[in-house]
Amino acid sequence: MKSFSQHAPNLYKARTKVLARRKREKTTTAGIADRITHGARLTRRAHARLYKRKSPSMPSMPPMSLIDRNSGRPYTIQMYIPQIEHILRTLSEKRIMVLATSRDGQVTARNMSVLVDYDAVYCQTDSRMEKTHAVERNPRAAYCVDNYQIYGTARVIGTWDDHPELRQKFKAVHAGSYERYKNLTTEVVIAFQIERIQIWEYENDIPYIVTADLLRNTYEKTEYTIA
C-alpha cells in the first residue's frame, strides 16, 4: 500500500489539472462575459464624457431648407462652414453652366441647363451624346459659370423616372427643356458631385482667388499678386 508521500505527486498533478480546467472555463464563459460587461460600462462612461464635453465655439451656419422624403415636412441641414454654405446658395441660383468632360485625352465643353441642389449639380442629356460616353469612361469633370470654376465627379444615375423628386425640382426651373425631351427614350440624367470650387473675385480692385474645398470643409482666400 502506497503512503501519502507516494500519492502526493499524483494528487498535486490532479489538483493542478482541475485548477487549469476551471481557469479555462472562466476564460471562455463567465470571464469573457465579465470583461464584456466591464467594457460596456467603460464605453458608456466614455460616451457620457464625450457628450458632456463642450464643443469648441463655431460660428453659426445659415440653414439649408430641405424636405423630408418620408414625412414631407421641411428641415434644415448644415454640412459646411458658413463661407461654403454661402457659395452653394449662390450657385443654386444658376441655371446655365458649361460642363467640361474628358475622354481618351480629348476635352469637350458645352452649355447645359442645370439644377443645383445643395452640393450636387444635375442635368439631362441623351445617352448617345459624347458627354455621356465621356462621363462613363472618366468621371472627373468640371463646371464653369461666371467667375466660378467647379470641380468634381459625374455619373449617370438613370432617368428622371428613377428620381421623381429631382424631376420636380428640374421642371420648376427648366419646364421648357424638360417638356421638349421628356419622351426621349434615350434620355439620362447626369449627377455631378461638387468637390472643390474656385472663385476669381475683386475686393477694392485687388484680385483674389477663393478656394472652397468641400471634401476637407475648408475655405481659403488668397491675394493674386502680379510679379
Image (spheres, helix red, strand yellow):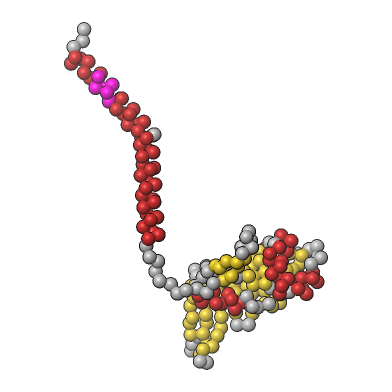
The x and y percentages for residue 224 are: 50, 85
Kindly give the residue lying farthest to the bottom in the view shown.
205
What residue do we see at 39% from left, 38% from top?
33
| Residue 174 appears anywhere in the view | yes
Say if residue 136 shows up in the picture.
no
- Which stretch appears magenta? 11-17
Q: How many marks?
A: 0
5 or 179, which is in the foreground?
A: 179
- Image-quadrant location for residue 107: bottom right
| Image point (71%, 63%), residue name | 164
Q: Is residue 224 above or below residue 5?
A: below
Q: Nearer the viewer, residue 209 or 57?
A: 57
Image x and y of residue 84, in percent:
53, 74
**Residue under the point 22% across and 15% down:** 7
On the rendered structure, is 118 left or right of 34?
A: right
> Would residue 97 appear left or right of 181 to someone viewing this image?
left
Q: Residue at x 59, y 70 (%)?
A: 65
